[in-house]
Structure formats: structure tokens, C-alpha cells
Image: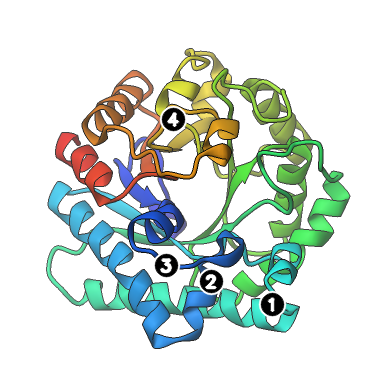
Amino acid sequence: MIQMLPNPDNGVFLTYTGMETDLIYNKGVDLPGFATHPLLASREGQDWLRPYYDSQIVLARAAGIGCILEAPTWAANRDRGRDIHCSETVLHQRNLQALDLLADIRRKHWRRQEAPTILLSANIGPRHDSYAPAAQMSAAEAENYHGAQIQSFATTEADLITAYTLSHAAEAIGILNASADTALPTVISFTVETDGRLPSGQPLQDAIEEVDQATDRAACYFMVNCAHPSHSSNVLDHAPWVQRLHGVVANASRCSHAELEASEELDAGDPVEFARLMMALHHEHPQITVLGGCCGTDMRHLHEMTKRV
């Protein structure tokens, strides 16, 4: 599957990581700990998840592009699991169940004509709150901590690992080191504040270059997620480091992380403006071929984007 991974020669890929906010604010589903993996435990819960993946594939097929299905495992790590009373055994089972669900969805769509390229991404989230950058780990600690989840994914049908919403270069380095023994390409996605810097204050360029130097460019590519498109576009130029950035999975809202945390209502922004800004990023930087929606987005935002592809 490696030859099918996103790159400038393989066209655009659509992805989506905004189901948590859509489920909570628009559908009234309770997600303790902002975790979707508990929904895997029941048929009813899985029925909440399946439509997101089916809709994404349908949109990708209509636009003639590929898609990446992100497993609902962003919060399925030890500390976040403990906060909602999930043991490590349960988390291991949930990580396996998540990829089994995605593999089943992919098989069903592949049986149909004109199915798009569908990749399955094993989704890893940060150990600590991305918006509270004071808490951090060394690369060695991160390697040890995330290793259990990565080893769970290594036995599944996942095509790649994507670590989302990271705010520290050291955690990214540890994740890449932990995945080195698997056959799974690994993607690193940082989140940024309104000034384009990581919540830790480190410039995005410095974070990417630090990770590449420490791991001998082990990351398949880098992305930015959980920030409005305008928050990252301001710091992107045409320097060599930007060529390592292949994806933007953006928030609907222009608000800062602190403003979003304090808000009691969902800011869905303007889907049309969102799509225009995302496509502008793609046109200005053609190597950015993974495009998607994060917090506050729903299928309206993806639909507007795919119309413009």
C-alpha cells in the first residue's frame, strides 16, 4: 500500500477528524473524555460512527479523489483511557476493533464500482492536553508511552499511523521511534495557535526540522490540524521545510484554542469560506494534498471542499 500513500503525484486525499464535536454539539451524543472509541463497544455506538466514513467515501468518489479514514482512537491511550475507566486491556481491544470497523467499511465500498483509493489510518493522540503545553515528555518517555498503542495497530489492516494534535517535537520524535519497528509509515501532525506556532511556542518550521533531524526524516510527511486554515497559511512560504508539509486538517472556527475551550457553543464557521481557504492552501502549496476537517466541521465543509477539487 506504500505506493498509494499521499504525495504530490497521487492527487488529493480527503480526511476527517471532526466527528467528536459533531457528535457532541449537533447530535447530542455524550463522549466522556472526548473519546469516540467507547462507541465501538456496541452496535448502536458503531452505527453513530459508520455514516461519517460512508459519507466521506461517497464525497471522495464523486470528486474523483482518494480518502483516508481515521480510526476513532485519538483518545485510546493509557492516561486518557484511565480517565474514563478503561483498562489497558480494553484499550487494546478498542484499537483492534476500530481498524476492524474501518476495514469492513472499506471492503464494502471496494465491492462497488468506481471505489476511490481508501487508506486506513491508525489515529494516535497526544498523552496530555494539546492546549496545555506545560505538560510534556522526553522523546524516550513518549516512545515508551505510545509504544503499546502502536504495537496494537501493527497487527491490524492499517495502512499508516497518524499522530494528531501534537504540541511538542519531543513527543513526535518518540512516536516515530516507537513505530520504527513496525511496517507502518507514520505521519506527524502538529497543532498551531493563531500565530502559526505550536502551543509550546515553538515555530512550526523549527518543530518539523527538529523532528526530521532527530529521526533521520522518519516521518512519512507532516501535517497541521486543529487550527483554522488562516492560522497556518500565514507562516508557510516556499522554503524547503514547507515541502515536508503534505496535509492540513483544519478547524471551522477562527478562534484561538483558549477561546474554543471556554466556549459552550459550537462555532461551525462558514463552510464556503473554509473550503475556499483550504483550496487556496492547496493551490499555493501543491504538495499539500491531504485536506480535511477537524473540530467544528461536518460534511457540509467537506462537501464544499470536494466541489472545488
Measured Cα–Cα span from mark 1 to mark 3? 19 Å
Q: Which residue bears the numbered disc 2?
A: 37
Q: Earlier in the sequence, mark 4 or mark 2?
A: 2
Q: Which residue bears the numbered disc 4?
A: 228
Secondary structure of residue under mark 1 = loop
Measured Cα–Cα span from mark 4 to mark 2? 25 Å
For the point 32% across and 75% down, which residue is it? 105
Circle 4 residues within 10 Å: few <14, some 14–19, many ≥20: many
Q: Earlier in the sequence, mark 1 or mark 3?
A: 3
On screen, residue 27 versus residue 165, left or right, reads left
Residue 98 vs residue 150, the one in the foreground: 98
Dot label at residue 86: 1
Circle 2 residues within 10 Å: few <14, some 14–19, many ≥20: many
Measuring from the top left, give residue 205's x and y in whole percent: 63, 21
Q: Amino acid at mark 3?
A: Val
Q: Which residue bears the numbered disc 3?
A: 29
The image quarter containing residue 154 is bottom right
Which dot, 4 or 3, sits closer to the camera? Answer: 3
Secondary structure of residue under mark 2 = helix
Q: Amino acid at mark 1?
A: Cys
